[in-house]
Image: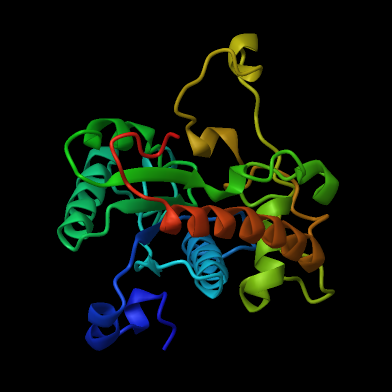
Amino acid sequence: MRPWKLLETNFAYVTANPYEVAVLPLGATEPHNLHLPYGTDVMEAEIVGERICEAAHAQGAKVVMLPTIPYGTETNLRQFPLAMNVQPSTLALVIRDLVETLAGSSIRKVLLLNSHGGNELKSVLRELYGRTSAQIFLCNWYQIFRDVEREIFTDPGDHAGEMETAFGLAFFPNLVARHPDGSLAADAGAAATTQFEALNRGWVTMTRPWHLLTTNTGVGNPHPATAEKGQRMMDVVVERLSKFLVELSAAEMNDRFPFV
């Protein structure tokens, strides 16, 4: 039994060892170029969650990792088979219900650990603010190493690129498809540009129709990826997020929480 993982924990342990912090990983089920599995975002959320909770628990944090939500918002991948969509409003209701359950169990510090770019969850935090006794935090784990990502990756990419492929090579290599010669069974991850400079430069944004943007759902060249790069990235993620969980577990909730 890993006592920081709810799926493996029993009622006797939970009642004798109350938790302070709950981590809710969120993934998605969708294609990832030609070489990564549909469950890439789910496995990333699960693996990151396991490692940060294990490290935090070892440092004394009273933290529990909830089961990973395997579905996310896929409205812009609807042209691809089995991109399993949950509407943003539906996902928000699921999160609301789970947060209410946690608060009812006296766990009022909640981290949403998001692994899917289509899950835009900041609005959920805003809607629930003041409506629950819990304080909800949000982490898109793939953004927290932006300051060092160019020290690790040539070009991390946006979807099924070098970063996600390196993650797969490091932590689920048996599910990364290869050609008989050992090379990745992936295309180059080229993405189309629009006819508008404002969109291409990020001044204006939109929901991107993935079937027009990509060839096989990949954005970013996966071929420079290595398992070593994936492990280096994970080391940064675990160091930064486990420290946060330890501090969050120890923090007193008062009228100014989380401010000093």
Task: Give x and y (percent) for residue 232.
Answer: 77, 60
Task: Give x and y (percent) for residue 243.
Answer: 58, 56
Residue drawn 40% across and 68% down? 62
Number of marks drawn: 0
Q: Quadrant of the N terminus?
A: bottom left
Position above or below: 106 against 155 = below
Say whether residue 124 is left or right of residue 79. Answer: left
The quarter of the picture where residue 207 lies is: top left
Task: Give x and y (percent) for residue 114.
Answer: 46, 50
Position above or below: 37 against 212 = below
Residue drawn 74% across and 53% down? 222
Residue drawn 81% across and 51% down? 152
Say whether residue 202 is left or right of residue 190. Answer: left
User: Which residue is nearer to you in this view: 71 or 25?
Assistant: 25
Position above or below: 119 against 244 = above
Task: Give x and y (percent) for residue 31.
Answer: 51, 56
